[in-house]
């Protein structure tokens, strides 16, 4: 059974992605292909399967391309941080992206995980910035730099700044809109 907080967060993410982020991606060709939003399917008719993708592997979207399908993690937040945020722990004690994705990477292909992560910052209903990078590279940055954990009322998380990743030679596609 999905809890109310998860369903509300999923609905907000779906709405922001469809109304703000996806039009930008299509207009600018920021990422090629079409998208299947896992969280939307979670609250619609494919609840059982899609819940497993989201809750067990941190895959929120599928990016469908002519040669295959790529799993993506999607984070949409307010603010102007220009970073990827990876939760280390949650007040609810549910497994986090750091745990699920880390386990999948360590098991070298046994478990699936989002190949890419897309982080979007939206303020006053407008997309302010978008970042896109390999999830494996984001976790490498966390493990190498030993980022300091930040906290909010629900979780502890690592902020991995896009500029830091670029400075370290990782490929990060970004667009600052404002």
Image: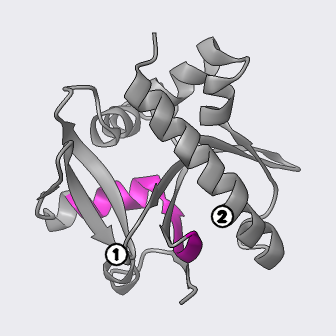
In the image, 129: left or right of 99? right
Task: Name the residue that disc number 1 marks.
Answer: 81
Is residue 111 visible in this depiction of the protein? no
Quarter placement of the N terminus: top left
Mark 1 or mark 2: name the one nearer the start of the chain.
Answer: 2
Task: Name the residue that disc number 2 marks.
Answer: 21
Where in the figure is residue 18, as x and y percent of width and height? Answer: 71, 53
In this view, the residue farthest toward the right is 66
Q: Magenta residues?
A: 125-142
- What mark, if any, has residue 12 been given in the picture? none
At x 39%, y 30%, the residue is 5
Q: Is residue 129 magenta?
A: yes
Rendered image quadrant of residue 25: bottom right
Where in the figure is residue 41, as x and y percent of width and height? Answer: 68, 28
Q: Which residue is at the front of the view, 10 or 175?
A: 10
In the image, 131: left or right of 30? left
Rendered image quadrant of residue 71: top right
Circle 1: element type = loop
Graded by Cα atoms within 10 Å as few (under 14), some (14 to 19) or many (20 or more), the crowding at tag 1 reads some
């Amino acid at each position: 059974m999905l809890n109310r907080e998860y369903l509300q967060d999923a609905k907000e993410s779906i709405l922001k992605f469809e109304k703000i982020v996806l039009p930008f991606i299509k207009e600018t060709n920021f990422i090629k292909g079409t998208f299947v939003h896992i969280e939307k399917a979670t609250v619609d008719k494919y609840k059982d399967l899609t819940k497993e993708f989201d809750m067990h592997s941190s895959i929120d979207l599928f990016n469908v391309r002519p040669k295959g399908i790529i799993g993506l993690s999607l984070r949409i937040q307010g603010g102007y941080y220009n970073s990827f945020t990876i939760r280390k722990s949650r007040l609810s004690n549910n497994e986090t992206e750091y745990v699920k994705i880390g386990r999948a990477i360590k098991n070298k292909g046994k478990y699936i995980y989002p190949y890419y992560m897309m982080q979007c910052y939206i303020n006053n209903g407008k997309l302010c910035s978008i970042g896109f990078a390999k999830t494996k590279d984001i976790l490498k940055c966390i493990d190498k730099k030993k980022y300091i954990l930040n906290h909010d009322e629900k979780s502890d998380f690592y902020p991995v700044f896009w500029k830091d990743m670029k400075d370290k030679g990782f490929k990060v596609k970004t667009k600052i809109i404002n």
